[in-house]
Image (cartoon, helix red, strand yellow):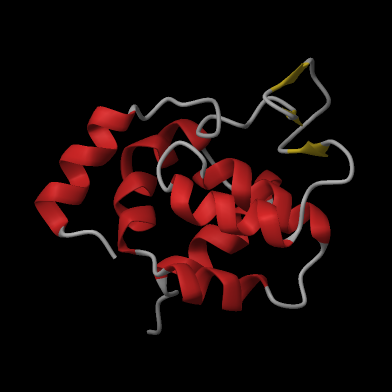
Amino acid sequence: MRSLAPESAVVQMAAQPREVPSWQSAAEWLPELVYESDRGRVLGELGGRRASTWARTGYLLQGMRPDVAEVIMGASPPASKVRFGPRAPSFSGASGTHAPFGGGIFSCRQREAKEAQRGFR
């Protein structure tokens, strides 16, 4: 059985957010996956994808890997709102009920602790 690379899983989640069974569950394991992701590979996964996927990936990574989010948003700035789920009030530039990470659930201290523990890529 072949598994997805961390970068592939992150971009696929952003491309098809409604297919993620539980964003609440993802909050437990996604940070680890994101910290294992390589910036160049994330950008490679985004190649040829829609602008909305670039924007959602940037928003998704914003609280955990701001370095990657900044590169994504610089390469493909969002031209309009993007949605993570059913329409709901807008916040942080993304709208929908499923944008749990861009708003900063994971603090800089948590990120710094993870970076120190794993070595930053």
Instruction: Please state, as top left, top right, bottom left or bottom right, where the N terminus lies in the image.
Output: bottom left
Identify which residue, 67 or 110, lies in the foreground. Answer: 67
As drawn, 7 above or below 70: below
Identify which residue, 9 or 67, lies in the foreground. Answer: 67
Instruction: Please state, as top left, top right, bottom left or bottom right, where the C terminus lies in the image.
Output: bottom left
Q: Position of residue 19 (x, y in %)?
A: 65, 50
Give the residue drawn at x 50%, y 64%.
9
Q: Position of residue 4 (x, y in %)?
A: 45, 74
As drawn, 18 above or below 15: above
- State left or right for residue 73 relative to residue 78: left
Residue 8 visible somewhere in the drawing: yes
Q: Residue furthest right?
A: 80
Identify which residue, 64 or 19, lies in the foreground. Answer: 64
Write down the quadrant of residue 18 in the picture. top right
Q: Position of residue 75 (x, y in %)?
A: 70, 62
- State left or right for residue 67 relative to residue 11: left
